[in-house]
Image: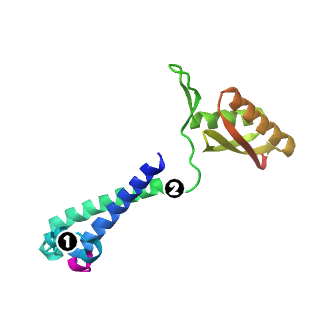
Amino acid sequence: MNAFNRFILLIVALLLIVVPVLLLLMAFGVLSAGLVAQYTGYNAALQALGGLSGSVFTSVVRTIIAIVGALLALIALLLLLRELTFGRRVARESVMDDTPGKETVITAGAVKTLADGAAREAGAREPSTSLSSDDGAYNVHSRIKIPESGNFTEVATRTRENVRRVLDGQGVRVKDVEVTVQGTAS
C-alpha cells in the first residue's frame, strides 16, 4: 500500500473510534451537545442528537448498541494495528522473472525453506530462518546450532555462503545473509 492509502486507512480507523465514543459520551450525559458542537461545528447533526439520552433505551436496544459499538471498536483497533505495526515487513512473495506471460513468483515460506535446507546442507543443526524485505530484496537471518565437534566460524561461514548460493541460484534477490550461532546441538 502506498502512503496515501495508509493515511486514508488511519483516518477511517480513528473516526471509527472517535465518533462512537463521542455519541456514547453525549448519550450518557458526560458531554453536552453544545460543547461538542462548539468544537466540531456540526450543529444540525448535534441538534438532532441533542435529545438522545441513555434512559430512553430499553435493555434490548442497549445490548444491540453495545454489541455494534464493540464490533466497530474491534474493527477500528484491527485497522489501526494493521497500519501501525512495528518492525520490518516481509514481502509475502518475490518476483523472480517478470517476462510477460512467464511471470515466476516465489513465496516467503519457500525462501525460508530453501534457506533452512541450505544451512543443513552446510552442516548446521536446527536452523531457523527469519526474513525481512528491503527494496524487493530479502535480508535473511539464520539462527543455527553447530555439532559438538564442529568449528563455529567455519560452519557459520559455510552456512552463509551456501544460503546465498542456493537463493541466488533460485533467482531470489538477497540483500544480506546473517548467520547467528546459538550454541551446540546435542
Mark 2 lies on residue: 85
**Magenta residues, start to end:** 29-36
Residue 139 has which mark?
none
Callout 1: few (<14), some (14-19), or many (20+) C-alpha neighbours within 10 Å? some
Q: Residues within 10 Å of mark 2 (few under 14, many from 20)?
A: few
Residue drawn at the location 28% of the way across and 66% of the way down: 20
Q: How is the image coloured?
A: rainbow
Q: Report whether 134 appears left or right of 35.
A: right
Is residue 123 at all visible to an observer of this figure? no
Q: Earlier in the sequence, mark 2 or mark 1?
A: 1
- Residue 178, position as x, y percentages in the image: 74, 45
In the picture of the structure, the residue carrying the numbered disc 1 is 43
As drawn, 3 above or below 41: above
Question: Which quadrant of the structure image shows residue 148?
Answer: top right
Under circle 2, the secondary element is loop
Q: Quadrant of residue 115?
A: top right
Nearest to the observer: residue 29 or residue 5: 5
Residue at left offset 33%, top offset 62%: 15
Disc 2 from disc 1: Cα separation: 37 Å
Amino acid carrying label 1: it is Asn
The nearer-to-camera label among 2 and 1 is: 1
- As helix, strand or loop, the secondary structure at mark 1 comes to helix
The three-letter code of the residue at mark 2 reads Thr
